[in-house]
Amino acid sequence: DLSPLAILVANAELHEETAKNLGHDCLSANFRYANERERTVAFVAASVITQLTGGRFYAPEHEDWFDGNDALEAAQELMQPLELHVLAMEQHIPTLEQWRQELKVAGLDFDLPPESDLRAAAGFFPVLSRRGATGFAFSLSPAEYVVGGDLFPADEAPREVFKMTAAANFRFAEGRPAAAAAVAAAVFARMTDGYVYNPRKASFSSGPEALELARSSETEDGGP
């Protein structure tokens, strides 16, 4: 909704001094939401309006003000796809059945034919977890597609990463798919002596480290 700043001041949503600095003739475009997905959409929409109007954007969860450019940059970061990459040696990549057997121990099972060729597989992988059906997108690519990117934190990467020749790529939604993908990536990394690269956090974890992190998350949210 759109409202004058005076209404926000009267509802104690905006400090009177802040309203005075912005100008009492200003209007406020207000976004309200019910869940995290709606918050993301509201943040993007508010950022675009800020850029179009030359206005200022206040995000209460950040306790900060953004101009148009900063707001759009924050929105783009928020809309980055959730993904993980396992950097490994091509010759160490397991078959789907070998991966399936290891994942069963971790509480996951692929809903795919056991004869499927993992090296040729690409697309959505249905997964059965302790809490029901979920899944993630999976593909294999040459490692340089990940390591060679402009945003890749080369200075922080373990030296072994630059010897890797393959990347197993996982894309997923928040919640249960993210938990399942974290376990699947960690098990894949452990089997291949690879590293899990999280582009959002610019972090690297060995297979055992990534699996420990994934299990910690399972304990907090009840499992994948």
Image (spheres, rainbow, N blue to C red):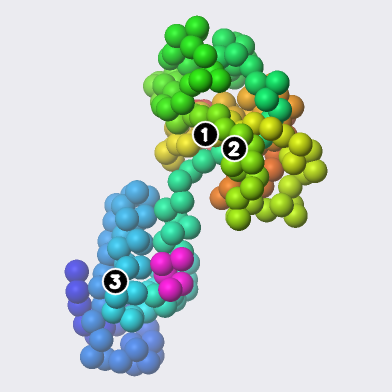
Assess whether residue 115 is covered by the magenta stretch: no
Range of magenta residues = 69-73
- Residue highlighted by disc 1: 170
Amino acid type at image mark 1: Phe
- Residue highlighted by disc 3: 49
Disc number lying in front (3 or 2)? 2
**What residue sits 35% from the left and 68% below the top?**
47
Residue 198 drawn above or below residue 121: below
Sequence-first disc among 1 and 2: 2
Residue 122 drawn above or below residue 58: above
Residue 163 position by quadrant: top right
Q: Nearer the viewer, residue 1 or 188?
A: 188
Q: Nearer the viewer, residue 215 or 119?
A: 119
- Mark 1 residue element: strand
Residue 25 position, x and y percent, is: 23, 91
Tell whether 53 sits left or right of 85: left
**What residue sits 71% from the left and 52% below the top?**
154
- Residue highlighted by disc 2: 85
Q: Nearer the viewer, residue 119 or 189?
A: 119
Q: CA gap, disc 3 to disc 2?
A: 34 Å
